[in-house]
Amino acid sequence: MQRTRNNTVWSILLALVLSLGALPHSAPAYEEIEVTDGGTIAGTVQFTGDPPTPAKLEITKDVDVCGKTEKVEESLLVGPNKGIKNVVVSITNIQKGKPLRNGAVLDQKDCVYTPHVVLSPVNTPLRILNSDGILHNVHTHSTKNPPFNRAQPKFRKEMTETFAHPEVIKVTCDAHGWMSGWLVIHEHPYYTVTDEAGAFELTDVPAGDYQLKFWHETLGEVTQQVSVKPKETTTVTVTLGPK
Ligand SMILES: [Cu+2]
């Protein structure tokens, strides 16, 4: 009798744990809608302080291919007007809006990841190209998505990988120690990367109040509130600098 009762208690507890596990813990899924009178968020990200000079990359292997052009370290690129390149700008709290874009491309060209920061939608194949005709190795340092370490021999011009979870992932090449890039796997289309002048633009944003996030690989992140009005441009300028 005692055993039966214990079994019943355990069964109830097990059912409770299982049902809790089945509850949705994540934010509601992004809903794609037609945006006809959206607004634009545009602006720049500025560097505070004296702009650093990027270090020259030392090419120590496959010099005939990788050393054809001079290369600099891309972890912090500040333009003449102090605009910061490669800052990822995103809306953190948007539930519905324009459809997610098509898939993205990461190229390995002259032994550099091009572009340095790739925006790639979730559950969409990312095309990984090897334009160099030498062996590269794509090594992702992820935790939410399964990390992988795939050799891409010179004859494999293209391979694909698909990521199920939003995540910012560092990519390195085990064959060429100087190669470093970033994959930003995103769940909605309101993501962009700043250009050489530190400028960015997010278009077709449904009217509303949002939080913008600015993330840079060495400078960290800042957030800012913005209000978007129909068919108007909201201008935002933020600063990032050494900590
Ligand atoms: Cu490589």
Image: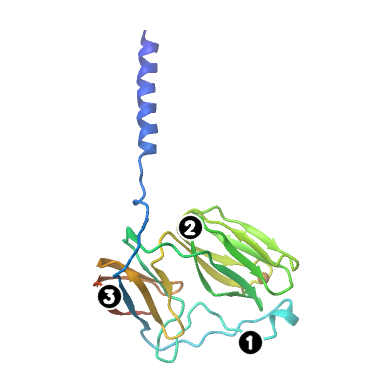
> Foreground residue, 92 or 137?
92
Between the C-alphas of marks 1 and 2, the distance is 34 Å
Find the distance from the CA under tag 3 to the CA under tag 1. Answer: 44 Å
Residue drawn at x 27%, y 77% as measured from the top left: 234
Q: Amino acid at mark 3?
A: Lys
Whichever of labels 2 and 3 marks the residue nearer the N terminus, that label is 2
Respond yes or no on whether mark 2 lies under 8 Å from ligand 1.
Answer: no
Q: Residue at x 37, y 56 (%)?
A: 30
Asked if residue 194 is positioned above or below residue 144 in the image, the reply reads: below
174 or 210: nearer the viewer: 210
Quadrant assignment, res 205: bottom left
Q: Tell me where residue 202 appears, x and y as whole percent.
A: 37, 73
Side of 210 where 117 appears, left or right: right
Q: Quadrant of the C terminus?
A: bottom left
Query: Which element type, helix, strand or loop, lies under badge 2?
Result: loop
What x and y, as percent, mark residue 67? 69, 83
SS at badge 3: loop
Q: Nearer the viewer, mark 3 or mark 1?
A: 3
| Res 243 seen here | no
- 45 over 120 or under it: above or below: below
Write down the residue under mark 3.
Answer: 231
Q: First in sequence: mark 3 or mark 1?
A: 1
Residue 178: x percent and y percent? Answer: 62, 74
Q: Which residue is mark 2?
A: 122
Question: Mark 1 — residue?
Answer: 70
Using a 10 Å C-alpha cutoff, classify the residue at mark 2 as few (fewer than 14 neighbours), some (14 to 19) or many (20 or more).
many
